[in-house]
């Protein structure tokens, strides 16, 4: 098993660049040699919904996707990351089925959160409901009828196939110990999905509630500390939360970068981006695109409301062809004192930039020079456009950015000159020693330019970019000489 390295990580499902993990490995060997050092394989366990995020059990790999042997073989070539849902399980999991069957006699009864028992008055007051951070306009609960005929109302943050779990329950902690211990035998890095929702207290947002969130995190980390397994917390919210996590030494995500780059490339300004690059955590994974879309809430305070609206409206114009086929507007959140608002933008990153090759390659170059380890989503790896056909087939809104590629489609996509240039820069990012050193962000000259320099002893790598004409140049040291790796000229 490879440990985490400072090399670019691919984000992919096990079956979207080939039918299963064996096919994925063959595609990576054939078309992307040395482009990646790591892979985040999105949930590959038996699941009842949410594209793998409603896990039934972690004991086995979904047989349609592969086996633990396939995971281990990939783990000899790449450092791997796997998901663990700290906040919820599938309603088809053995523990929940046992509770439904045996009711109060079930050893798993306390694993699930009774909505009525949670609130001091049996139900939340209007004030308590108003301050809650939630993904549903109504309260986050579902009603079930147990086999003994009793109706129970249980906490349910997300979709109908998922049910929240109580991290303080002994049964839940045994579940964590067993399953996290198993996953840690196969991967060096585990992502805690949606863990901020696991901190619940009446009268609060029930999202990243302090100090409870640190107790929950410690409960989840206990099984990992025994093996030295690293953890990446998945939190889509204001960037201040990432800063708090980073202060405690955890890996974090840079979910602010995608919107900041869109804003810069759409306006020709770099001041907002430069500010962020100076203050962002250094121990982080950077993204431009993910399986969920382009985060909006993450950048509040780094862009003004007007600037966020400008980017959102531009992306909305691009995604207009998708609108007739959307059954609902996408992922929403309800926060205190506000109407429900969009949480993320449903769009591929290439489409969000108007399929402009020059803008896209510049965006990736900046990402590869941003502090942290870059992650590249498989659709972005192929400069994928919005999948309108998936929406026409009635698939959920996020399918716009979840196209399943045939090998023929991959073989054709990688011929694109812009992508060949991107892969060249990615290989450089994985191998040049400067990226293991210190990063310096050039001053804001208020002229749409950006300079990022990495220095490690006698080695350096430098990006000079101009967002007004999408030009950039990468220079670096090579055996004591200064060379130009790549230049994209202005127009």
Image (cartoon, rainbow, N blue to C red):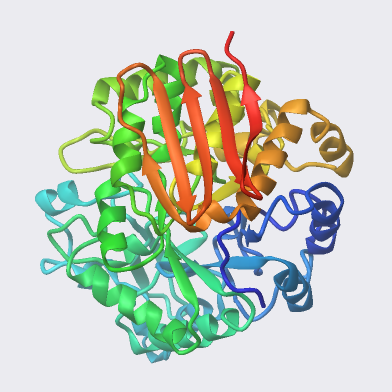
Q: Residue furthest right?
A: 408
User: Residue 452 or 13: which is nearer the viewer?
Assistant: 452
Between residue 4 and residue 129, name the one nearer to us.
4
Q: Residue farthest to the front?
A: 480
Please provide percent x and percent y for residue 209.
20, 62
Q: Picture quarter containing residue 387? A: top right
- On screen, residue 279 versus residue 481, left or right, reads left
Determine if residue 288 is in view: no
**Direction top: furthest residue:** 491
Looking at the image, which is closer to me, 198 or 410? 410
In the rendered image, the vertical position of residue 366 relative to residue 155, given as above or below: above
In the rendered view of the protein, which quadrant contains the N terminus?
Answer: bottom right
Residue located at (79% from left, 28% from top): 416
287 with respect to 7 (left or right): left
Residue 453 vs 265, above or below: the answer is below
Instruction: Give the residue displayed 78% in from the left and 41% down from the top.
Output: 405
Can the viewer see residue 13 in this picture? yes
Q: Position of residue 217 (x, y in %)?
A: 33, 73
User: Dividing the picture into quarters, in which one does residue 144 lie?
Assistant: bottom left
């Amino acid at each position: 098993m490879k440990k985490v390295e400072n090399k670019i990580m691919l984000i992919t499902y096990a079956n979207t660049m080939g039918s299963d993990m064996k096919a994925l490995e063959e595609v990576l060997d054939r078309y992307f040699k040395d482009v990646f050092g790591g892979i985040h394989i999105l949930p590959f366990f038996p699941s009842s919904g949410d594209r793998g995020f409603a896990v039934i059990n972690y004991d086995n790999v979904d047989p349609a996707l592969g086996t633990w042997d396939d995971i281990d073989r990939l783990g000899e070539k790449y450092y791997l990351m796997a998901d663990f849902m700290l906040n919820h399980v599938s309603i088809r999991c053995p523990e929940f089925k046992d509770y439904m069957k045996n009711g109060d006699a079930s050893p798993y009864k306390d694993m699930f959160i009774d909505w009525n028992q949670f609130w001091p008055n049996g139900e939340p007051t209007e004030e308590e409901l108003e301050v809650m951070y939630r993904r549903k306009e109504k309260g986050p609960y579902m009603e079930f009828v147990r086999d003994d005929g009793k109706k129970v109302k249980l906490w349910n943050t997300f979709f109908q196939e998922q049910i929240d779990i109580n991290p303080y329950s002994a049964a839940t902690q045994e579940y964590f110990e067993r399953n996290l211990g198993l996953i840690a035998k196969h991967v060096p890095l585990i992502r805690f999905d949606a863990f901020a929702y696991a901190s619940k207290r009446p009268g609060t947002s029930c999202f990243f509630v302090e100090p409870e969130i640190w107790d929950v995190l410690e409960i989840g980390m206990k099984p990992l500390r025994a093996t030295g397994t690293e953890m990446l917390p998945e939190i889509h919210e204001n960037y201040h939360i990432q800063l708090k996590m980073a202060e405690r030494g955890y890996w974090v995500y840079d979910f602010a970068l995608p919107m900041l780059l869109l804003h810069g490339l759409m306006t020709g300004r770099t001041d907002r981006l430069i500010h962020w690059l100076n203050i962002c955590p250094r121990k982080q994974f950077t993204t431009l695109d993910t399986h969920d879309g382009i985060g909006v809430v993450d950048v509040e305070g780094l862009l003004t409301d007007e600037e966020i609206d400008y980017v959102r409206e531009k992306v909305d114009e691009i995604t207009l062809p998708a609108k007739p086929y959307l059954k609902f507007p996408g992922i929403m959140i309800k926060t205190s004192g506000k109407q429900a608002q969009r949480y993320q933008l449903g769009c591929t990153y290439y489409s969000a930039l108007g399929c402009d090759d020059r803008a896209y390659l510049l965006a990736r170059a900046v990402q590869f020079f941003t502090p942290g380890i870059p992650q590249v989503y498989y659709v972005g790896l192929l400069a994928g456009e919005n999948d309108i056909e998936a929406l026409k087939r009635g698939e959920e809104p996020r399918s716009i950015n979840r196209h399943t590629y045939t090998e023929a489609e991959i073989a054709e996509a990688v011929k694109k000159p812009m992508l060949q240039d991107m892969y060249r820069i990615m290989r450089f990012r994985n191998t040049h020693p400067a990226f293991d050193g210190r990063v310096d962000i050039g001053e804001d000259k208020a002229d749409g330019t950006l300079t990022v320099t990495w220095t490690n002893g006698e080695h350096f790598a430098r990006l000079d970019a101009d967002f007004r004409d999408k030009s950039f140049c990468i220079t670096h040291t090579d055996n004591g000489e200064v060379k130009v790796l790549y230049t994209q000229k202005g127009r």
